[in-house]
Image: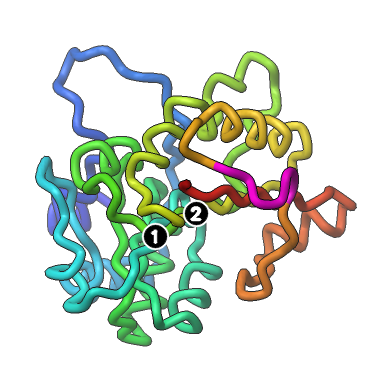
Amino acid sequence: MDTIFDEIPSLAKVEDREFGAPRAIKSFVLRSAGLKPFQIEALRQYYPTHALEFQREALDFKEVFGNDKPVIIEIGFGMGTSSHRIAKDRTDYNYLGLEVFLSGFAKLLSLIGKDDLPNIRIMRFDAVEVLTHMIVEGSVAGFHIFFPDPWPKKKQQKRRLIQVPLAMLLASKLQKGGYIYCVTDWEEYAHQMLNVFAQVPSLTNPYGGFAPPKEWRPTTSFEQKGLAQEFPINEVWVERQ
């Protein structure tokens, strides 16, 4: 692991915080996991062509993708299997995937690198900082947030990703008519999502509650495990007015 960080130093840092500065409450906790040889090779081979690095400058989507197609940002893509499938199937859109966990980052990098997909780039960095410093207001066509960590214990719930401040930030980055699409198998969290988005004046829920499934979203292995345990899959779709 140290070797790949030596080769690609930017991989070792997932937040832009000065030493000693107070740490904000995070929706993630980094876990250590060894990388398999194919993941290390993917980092070496495809990071220069399919990954972006954090910078305190606004991204120019046209420069990144070479076209004016609408851009979808996925926050927390996990192992990336659905991200890969969606980008491969829905080529009318460009995709930016954000994930801090290195194993999933390397796995998706391997998938999109082998297929040489031109319409997806990924970053290993804290999504809030990327949105704050790199994404222009009113520039995003949609956000995907699939199965975020539910942090089920009461004392943990302050770590949940979907809170009013983030919802306000997401809404500010959306184009008019742009959407936020969330999916969870934790029912109480799903209701919290509805409540949070209802507090953002610029967002509207065209369904008045949970949304029907989108046929283009693949069912992941994680989701299949939840279905096997009879967890309800709730989908939330809101739009910028």
Q: Residues within 10 Å of mark 1 (few under 14, many from 20)?
A: many
Mark 1 lies on a secondary structure that is strand
Residue 141, label in figure: 1
Residue 237, label in figure: none
In the rendered view, would you say 132 is above or below 147? above
Q: Decide if residue 108 is on the left or right side of residue 234.
A: left
Q: Decide if residue 88 is on the left or right side of residue 208.
A: left
Instruction: Give amino acid for label 2.
Output: Tyr
The magenta-colored residue range is 204-210
Of the two numbered discs 1 and 2 on the same chain, state the one appearing first in sequence. 1
Labels 1 and 2 touching (C-beta < 8 A): yes
Residue at the (28%, 55%) spot, across then down: 139
Q: Quadrant of residue 157?
A: top right
In the rendered view, would you say 153 is above or below 208? above
Residue at the (19%, 26%) spot, across then down: 17
Query: How far is disc 1 from disc 2 in space, using C-alphas?
Result: 7 Å
- The kind of secondary structure the magenta stretch mainly shows is loop
Residue at the (70%, 22%) spot, across then down: 153
Image coordinates for residue 233, horizontal then vertical, percent: 77, 52
Residue at the (31%, 85%) spot, across then down: 116
Image coordinates for residue 71, horizontal then vertical, percent: 34, 65
Instruction: Give amino acid for label 1.
Output: Ala
Mark 2 lies on a secondary structure that is strand
Q: Which residue is mark 2?
A: 179
